[in-house]
Image (cartoon, rainbow, N blue to C red):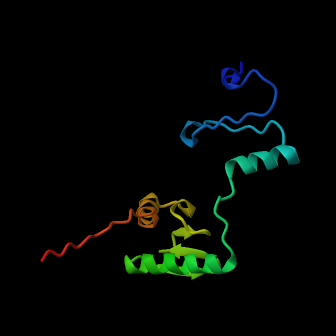
Amino acid sequence: TDPWKDLRPHTKGSSVCVVMGHAVEEVELLQDASGETGEHLWTFLNPTPPCSLDAKQTRRKRVAVCSWLRKNRVPVEEVEEEVRVAGVLTITAPYRSEDCSSSNQVILDRVQRLLRPRPIVYCYVIISE
């Protein structure tokens, strides 16, 4: 019997069924994906970032992120086009919170919170005479 039968769409074409890692008991390769199928799957799972920066903007953004993290006492180093945090987290261009990757969930969460856009707080000073 096929346990995935009810999860497959009844129409022709491609479909993707995502199963969380903890629920996987066994993996069996039925056939290698064709070039086109593999390309579609890769595009689906790894979308290109909507933000495109030129080389100068990318460098400026990388320097700003490093500066911000250092200001918050986070150990940072620049390695080519990547920013490395404490040797366990990598930030790739365009250096947003969603561009962070790490197997250390605690550090990942803390750095992402530092990189998330903060609301602009306006301060008004009223001088009365």
Residue under the point 50% across and 78% down: 64
Q: Quadrant of residue 57?
A: bottom right
Report the front residue among 27 and 109: 109
Q: Position of residue 71 (x, y in %)?
A: 39, 80
Which quarter shows the C terminus? bottom left
Farthest front residue in view: 129
Q: Position of residue 42 (x, y in %)?
A: 74, 50
Farthest top residue in view: 1
Tally of numbered discs? 0
From what the image shows, is residue 46 above or below residue 122? Answer: above
Report the front residue among 39 and 4: 39
Residue under the point 33% across and 66% down: 121
Q: Position of residue 65 (x, y in %)?
A: 50, 75
Residue under the point 18% across and 76% down: 127
Question: Left or right of 86: which side holds 60?
Answer: right
Residue under the point 55% across and 62% down: 101
